[in-house]
Amino acid sequence: MPSVRIYQKKQLRLDLLNFRQSQMFKVGNVGVAAVKNRVSAAQGPADSAAKPLTKRYAIRKTKLGKGNRRDLSLTGDMLRNFLVRTVSENRAKASLSTRKDRIKAWVNQRIEPWIAFSPKNRAAVVEATRRVLAEMKPRLLVERALGGKQR
């Protein structure tokens, strides 16, 4: 007697595990805010004190009443324009909006890296990602119970 075997393939759908753009925007904003807070507190990329200013620039900045710390806030434009600009499901990219500020940032980056995640910044981003994943968990369980993503 002939027999017939029937196979049912189960597909593993990994697209449900991706972040949405709004969630990635939240994570990116946390990272940018952490970097801005570190820089405005005059801390370097290793959460230690930033490099001292040159003698002439420190005198000039002190005369303007801004203090003699490397906190990138003589006018405030550069830190104000440092924002999340582009977002996809797996990447959030922050940059400066004007060419003048990009050039100033490039020069300051050569003096001491400031557009970098310090250990505390990295911990803040990881914590924000954990919160986003915790927000996603109930949605993933409901969608799985209903048979996948409901379109």
Image (tube, rainbow, N blue to C red):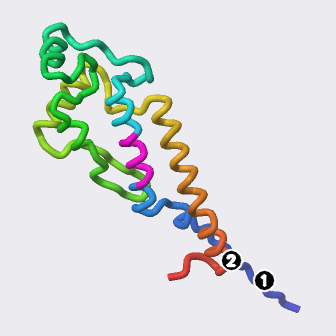
Question: Callout 2: few (<14), some (14-19), or many (20+) C-alpha neighbours within 10 Å?
Answer: few
User: Is 52 placed above or below 148 here?
Assistant: above
Residue 69 quadrant? top left
The residue beneath circle 1 is 5
User: Is 34 placed above or below 150 here?
Assistant: above
Where are the magenta residues, as a range? 26-33
Disc marking residue 144: none
Spot occupied by residue 129 in the image (x, y as percentages of width and height): 52, 50
Q: What residue is shown at x 19% (from left), y 10% (from top)?
A: 54
Q: What residue is shown at x 28% (from left), y 12% (from top)?
A: 52
Q: Secondary structure at mark 2?
A: helix
- Which part of the image, by quadrant, shows the N terminus? bottom right
- Left or right of 56 on screen, residue 30: right
Of all residues shown, which one is farthest toward the top?
55
Q: What residue is shown at x 42% (from left), y 54% (from top)?
A: 26
Q: Work out whether residue 12 or residue 112 is closer to the camera in this orientation and state it.
A: 112
The residue beneath circle 2 is 145
- Left or right of 24 on screen, residue 5: right
Spot occupied by residue 10 in the image (x, y as percentages of width and height): 67, 73
- Work out how far the residue at label 2 is from the one at label 1, CA to CA, in angstroms: 28 Å
**Please, what is the three-letter code of the amino acid marked with disc 1?**
Arg
User: Is 1 placed above or below 41 here?
Assistant: below
Q: Work out whether residue 114 or residue 88 is closer to the camera in this orientation and state it.
A: 114
Q: Secondary structure at mark 1?
A: loop
Spot occupied by residue 3 in the image (x, y as percentages of width and height): 83, 88
The answer to whether residue 78 is magenta is no
Tell me which numbered mark, 2 or 1, is placed earlier along the sequence.
Answer: 1
